[in-house]
Image: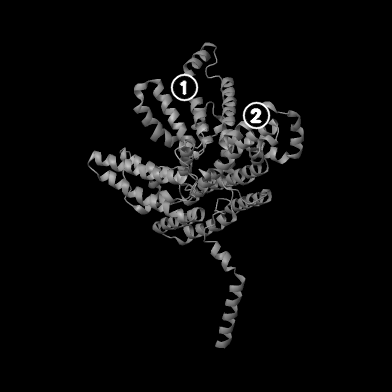
């Protein structure tokens, strides 16, 4: 009898060993440089549901829940950046103890030295990984010497979590915040996987108090989370990926192969592509955080409804805009206050040059930032004249004027975005050359006939963006009232739609490169 049992056990072991692909099993837990885990992939769903099961079912105490999030966040970042997860760990440990050191120091000069040393270290790490080759290129162009590009891997999300960590140290130095006593809790703030790769850039003063709660999730939270995840999946994996792969990328790769009409449509297409790509990630991040009992700050507020370029930056990537406003623009404004109006203009110029550089080590990004600074400075300088004119002709607070301001601003943003998307300065000029000298509008009917689905997705993207908040709230309320089974089924249907539309492998989020 015992011999039979042992024989059966041995046969089962052999069967399981042959049935399980050990190499693939190991691959699930190893880093793949060209296949990072991103929201919406089948791998992420597998990992996340396993994590959620442990978090909600097995982790019975708050301490266990916190450690579960921390370990999963580290694993998630490892799957996205490999060995460079150690940079994330370094950022947490370094800035935690720097914050303690600054707060406990009684000598103001010593506090200042520690503070600026921490800024130097944080920015130094960021500059090395993100800007070394760009600086070497500049030195070569200046004929300082001949420098070959270095092979440097850019860790995903380094700009986001570096700015998040720096805000903590800055607020302690400015005596706006007391340091957190727990390295564990601070690590959770830095590691938190929903926003570690692409934001929103949360503040410690908003996030850390939530760790003291019980991570409870209301029915309304679940309903809103389901809505956000569904919308994020559709934005990113249906709209952004499809129009990017099948139209926008092809035009911007070689603009001269296409007429001005196609280049113009690609500009419109890219504007909604990058919005759906980035805000789609944010929607999913906010939804996932809600399921864990955390509320993160809003990052988008109908940006294409902005009536000025400045208003746009109050609506687009709001967490970055507010970070730069609080920690760069306002200090510059105070330091340059004796320069009167020129001080504000200079502060805007530096801030938006930083905006361009934050997005990447490329002259096109610098030009993009400079263009936006020129728009804003011009608006600042002409505002008194425009206000006086509108008052005189009785158009102050006119809805008609506001509408035309929105349309005008959108096109300013759209055309400045060409430098953001183009692979080089010359390529951006080629796009404008085709639009202004080789329009050929007669090709539009033919393009529409052969690319109907692309046009439909672009239009749907803009309709989704301009959908009134009241309608969004009603849809969210409807989903909230659904049974959990129906909510799960709804998500499953959306995932099925994503699979049907997907024409290639899941595309990385555009802001991963920043």
Q: Residue at x 53, y 32 (%)?
A: 368
Comparing labels 1 and 2, the label whose residue is closer to the camera: 2
Q: Is residue 26 above or below residue 134?
A: below
**Residue 292 in the image: x percent, y percent?**
47, 51
Of 349 and 49, nearer the camera is 349
State the image quarter where residue 121 is shown.
Answer: top left
The local secondary structure at tag 2 comes to helix
Q: Is residue 295 visible?
A: no
Q: Are marks 1 and 2 in contact (CB under 8 Å)?
A: no
**Residue 400 in the image: x percent, y percent?**
59, 20
Of 514 and 196, nearer the camera is 514
Q: Is residue 424 visible?
A: yes
How many callouts does the rendering have? 2
State the image quarter where residue 329 is shown.
Answer: top left
Residue of label 2: 433
Locate residue 211 relative to residue 509 in the image: left or right.
left
Question: Farthest residue in the top direction?
Answer: 392
Q: Residue at x 68, y 49 (%)?
A: 503
Q: How many neighbours does mark 1 have within 10 angstroms: few (below 14), some (14-19), or many (20 or more)? A: some
Q: Residue at x 46, y 32 (%)?
A: 353
Q: How many neighbours does mark 2 have within 10 angstroms: few (below 14), some (14-19), or many (20 or more)? A: some
Q: Residue at x 39, y 24 (%)?
A: 343
**Residue 77 in the image: x percent, y percent?**
48, 53
Q: Is residue 241 above or below residue 68?
A: above
Of 189 and 62, nearer the camera is 189
Mark before the other along the chain sequence, 1 or 2:
1
**Quadrant housing the N terminus:** bottom right
The local secondary structure at tag 1 comes to helix
Q: Which mark is residue 360?
A: none
Residue of label 1: 380
């Amino acid at each position: 009898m015992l011999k039979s049992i042992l024989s059966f056990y041995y046969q089962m072991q052999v069967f399981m060993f042959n049935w399980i692909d050990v190499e693939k099993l190991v691959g699930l837990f190893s880093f793949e440089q060209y296949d990072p885990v991103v929201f919406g992939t089948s791998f992420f769903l597998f990992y996340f549901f396993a994590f959620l099961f442990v978090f909600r079912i097995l982790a019975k105490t708050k301490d266990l829940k916190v450690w579960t999030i921390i370990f999963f966040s580290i694993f998630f970042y490892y799957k996205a950046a490999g060995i460079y997860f150690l940079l994330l760990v370094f950022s947490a440990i370094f800035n935690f103890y720097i914050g303690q050191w600054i707060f406990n120091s009684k000598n103001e000069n010593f506090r200042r030295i520690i503070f600026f040393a921490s800024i130097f270290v944080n920015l130094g790490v960021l500059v090395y990984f993100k800007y070394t080759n760009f600086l070497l290129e500049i030195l070569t162009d200046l004929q300082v010497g001949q420098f070959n590009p270095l092979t440097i891997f850019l860790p995903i999300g380094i700009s986001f979590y570096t700015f998040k960590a720096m805000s903590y140290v800055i607020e302690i130095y400015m005596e706006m915040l007391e340091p957190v006593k727990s390295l564990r809790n601070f690590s959770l703030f830095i590691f938190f996987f929903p926003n570690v790769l692409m934001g929103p850039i949360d503040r410690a003063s908003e996030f850390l108090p939530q760790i003291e709660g019980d991570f409870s999730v209301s029915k309304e939270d679940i309903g809103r989370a389901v809505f956000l995840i569904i919308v994020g999946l559709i934005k990113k994996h249906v709209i952004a990926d499809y129009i990017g792969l099948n139209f926008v990328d092809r035009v911007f790769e070689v603009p001269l192969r296409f007429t001005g009409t196609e280049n113009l449509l690609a500009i419109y297409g890219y504007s909604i592509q990058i919005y759906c790509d980035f805000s789609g990630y944010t929607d999913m991040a906010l939804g996932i955080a809600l399921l864990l009992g955390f509320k993160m700050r809003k990052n988008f507020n109908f940006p294409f409804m902005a009536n000025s370029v400045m208003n746009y930056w109050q609506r687009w990537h709001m967490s970055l805009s507010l970070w730069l406003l609080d920690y760069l623009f306002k200090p510059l404004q105070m330091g340059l206050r004796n320069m009167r109006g020129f001080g504000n203009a200079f502060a805007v110029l530096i801030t938006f040059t930083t905006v361009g550089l934050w997005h990447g080590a490329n002259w096109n990004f610098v030009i993009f930032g400079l263009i936006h600074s020129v728009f804003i400075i011009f608006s600042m300088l002409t505002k008194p004249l425009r206000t006086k004119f509108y008052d005189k002709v009785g158009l102050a607070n006119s809805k008609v004027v506001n509408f035309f301001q929105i349309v005008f601003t959108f096109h300013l943003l759209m055309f400045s975005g060409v430098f953001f998307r183009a692979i080089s300065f010359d390529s951006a000029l080629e796009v404008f050359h085709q639009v202004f000298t080789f329009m050929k509008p007669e090709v539009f009917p033919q393009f529409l006939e052969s690319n109907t689905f692309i046009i439909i997705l672009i239009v749907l993207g803009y309709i989704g963006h301009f959908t009134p908040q009241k309608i969004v709230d009603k849809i969210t309320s409807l989903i909230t009232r659904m049974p959990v089974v129906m909510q799960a089924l709804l998500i499953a249907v959306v995932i099925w739609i994503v699979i049907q539309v997907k024409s290639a492998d899941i595309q990385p989020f555009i802001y991963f490169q920043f």
